[in-house]
Image (cartoon, coloured by chain):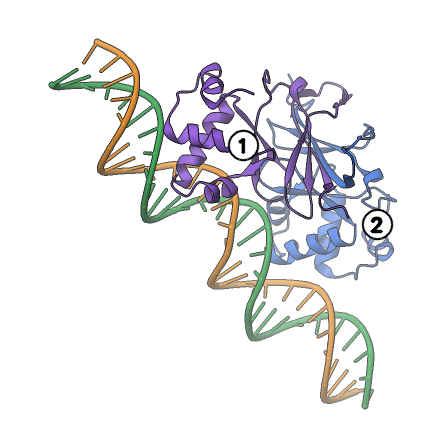
Chain colours: A blue, B purple, C green, D orange
Amino acid sequence: MQTEEEILKIKKVKNTAARTVVLRHLLSLEKAQSLKDIVNALPYTDRSSIFRTLKTFEENKVIHSIEDGSGMTKYAVCAEGCNCDPKDLHYHFYCTNCDKTFCLFDVPIPNIQLPKNFKLQQANMVVKGLCDNCNR
Amino acid sequence: MQTEEEILKIKKVKNTAARTVVLRHLLSLEKAQSLKDIVNALPYTDRSSIFRTLKTFEENKVIHSIEDGSGMTKYAVCAEGCNCDPKDLHYHFYCTNCDKTFCLFDVPIPNIQLPKNFKLQQANMVVKGLCDNCNR
DNA sequence: CATTTACCGCAACTCGATTGCAAAGATTAT
DNA sequence: ATAATCTTTGCAATCGAGTTGCGGTAAATG
């Protein structure tokens, strides 16, 4: 497991107070977080600073964003070595009961045969249902 | 190809002026449309009427909605026989250049092996890139 | 025909996302 | 070390998609 400082150094993002605290927070959680989640968890950091931090992180591939259909974009730290290329894709699982979003790193994404002359750049694959905790 | 009237009858949705015009519009286009797209295309029908019509259609499985990451939910008419079950899923392709969303009916979705005790209900699979028209 | 129910149009509102701006902090040049 | 420059931060305001309340109209029911 890399530390915040190591990740920021590798991804060439300048280390600032807000960035450290946001990244540390994301690393401490196993599930993707919305801006609101993060704002609530970090009461001493301003919403717009967190917002801009997330944008910076996304541009520099420190984190990736997921649109899970909850109405709020969620963010999760990229796996080590991730370049956010199509090959780094993974499914996300959105629990319709508890509103949590999981990264399914272990489930491979198949090769998708696109129509002629279509070019793949990215994908947002969200599987919805009940997580183990809510499926009782 | 079914007509608006036939579809509404089959799906047990009462036929009204707004519903007919919205459904006819969706059927006339091959790509998924946002609320805004539809509002712009139908200047004599009110935004909230179109909105409620889309909700009614979705509840009754006349159309399905897609979150393609453009910031706007898009809507497309369900294929004949679709029940919006997981087995009726298909990929959507979002063109990052022209902002259009395509239903990829011909590309099969594989079986996804979820973690233990997770239950699949639905999925939103959006592949992003360039469509044939924009990939030059 | 009277009554009830559903639908439509207008305007207002909610809330997540985003931006303008000035102050504070960090970096570079002198 | 100090001045000039660029970056980041915090606050407040704005934007826009989605949604809702409500009165009026149309359709269905008795």
From the image, which quarter does the N terminus of chain A lie in? top right
- Residue plotted at (60% across, 41% down): A72
Q: Nearer the viewer, residue A69 or B130?
A: B130
- The answer to whether C7 appears left or right of A17 in the picture is left
Return the x and y of residue C1 as percentages of the image width and height.
11, 18
From the image, which quarter does the C terminus of chain A lie in? top right
Amino acid marked by disc 2? Thr
A18 over D22 or under it: above or below: below
- Residue plotted at (78% across, 39% down): A117
Q: Nearer the viewer, residue B88 or B102?
A: B102
- For residue D19, what is the image quadrant? top left
Numbered circle sitting on residue A91: none
On the question of residue A92 being in view, the answer is yes
Q: Nearer the viewer, residue B131 or C26?
A: B131
Return the x and y of residue C16 as percentages of the image width and height.
56, 45
Q: Residues within 10 Å of mark 1 (few under 14, many from 20)?
A: few
User: Marks 2 and 1, Cα distance to the nearest angstrom?
Assistant: 54 Å
Mark 2: secondary structure = loop
Return the x and y of residue A26 as percentages of the image width and height.
73, 45
- Residue plotted at (46% across, 32% down): B22
Q: Nearer the viewer, residue B75 or A3?
A: B75
Q: Label 2, on which residue? A: A3
On the question of residue A46 being in view, the answer is no
- For residue C21, what is the image quadrant? bottom right
Numbered circle sitting on residue B28: 1
Amino acid marked by disc 1? Ser
Chain name for mark 2: A
Mark in front: 2 vs 1: 1
